[in-house]
Image (cartoon, grey):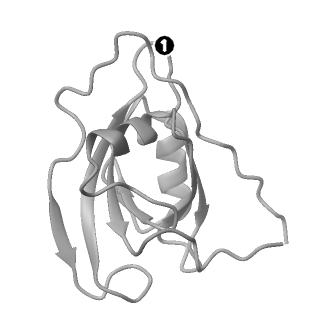
Amino acid sequence: QQQQQQQPLDFQQPEGFRNVGSGYIGSSSLGGGAGGQNSVVSEVVLNRGPAGAEFGFMVVPERDQATLVITWIDDVGLLGQWNRSHPAQPVRQGDRITSVNGTSGDSEGLRVQLLGAETVRMQVAHVGHGGAPNVAMA
């Protein structure tokens, strides 16, 4: 079995970047959500801009291969900046990315979108306060 190496998605925000028209759009309840518990789902929009800024987080596939688990967030990356702009519902380690730019149900497809798109519109299921309980350490 071939082991995949995770690439960090940690980028710096380009000078003059403004979080206008992106960021927290709304939330909803996801009954029996990712991780087997009720979750709140937020839409998060990040834009690398013309300078190719980094999103600033790392992910691993969930056991079901349908979602991605956020395992690390860089405070200076775009997601860290989004979190500071949305303190009532920050994205944390252990949260699940369930959709990226309309792609869902396939963790590799989600990862391809994260690595290749300048702008990502993610659905993130908030499943607790930190930790990534379903990530196996090797």
Q: Position of residue 115 (x, y in %)?
A: 55, 39
Q: Position of residue 50 (x, y in %)?
A: 42, 13
Say which element carries label 1.
loop
Q: Position of residue 84 (x, y in %)?
A: 34, 41
Q: Residue at x 54, y 80 (%)?
A: 64
Would you say 59 lies left or right of 99 here? right
Count how many numbered circles sit on residues in the image.
1
Q: Quadrant of residue 118?
A: top left
**Residue density around tag 1, few if under 14, some if 14–19, many if 20 or more, within 10 Å:** few
* Relative height, residue 57 to residue 97 (above, below): above
Q: Residue at x 39, y 19 (%)?
A: 49
Q: Residue at x 42, y 10 (%)?
A: 15
Q: Quadrant of residue 23?
A: top left
**Residue type, numbered disc 1:** Ala
Instruction: Tell me if I can see residue 115 in this picture.
Output: yes
Q: Position of residue 110 (x, y in %)?
A: 47, 54
Residue farthest to the top, as pictured? 16
Q: Quadrant of the N terminus?
A: bottom right
* Relative height, residue 73 to residue 3 (above, below): above
* Relative height, residue 51 to residue 84 (above, below): above
> Label 1, on which residue?
51
Q: Quadrant of the C terminus?
A: bottom right
Would you say 94 lies left or right of 135 here? left
Q: Residue at x 25, y 53 (%)?
A: 43
Instruction: Tell me if I can see residue 120 in this picture.
Output: no
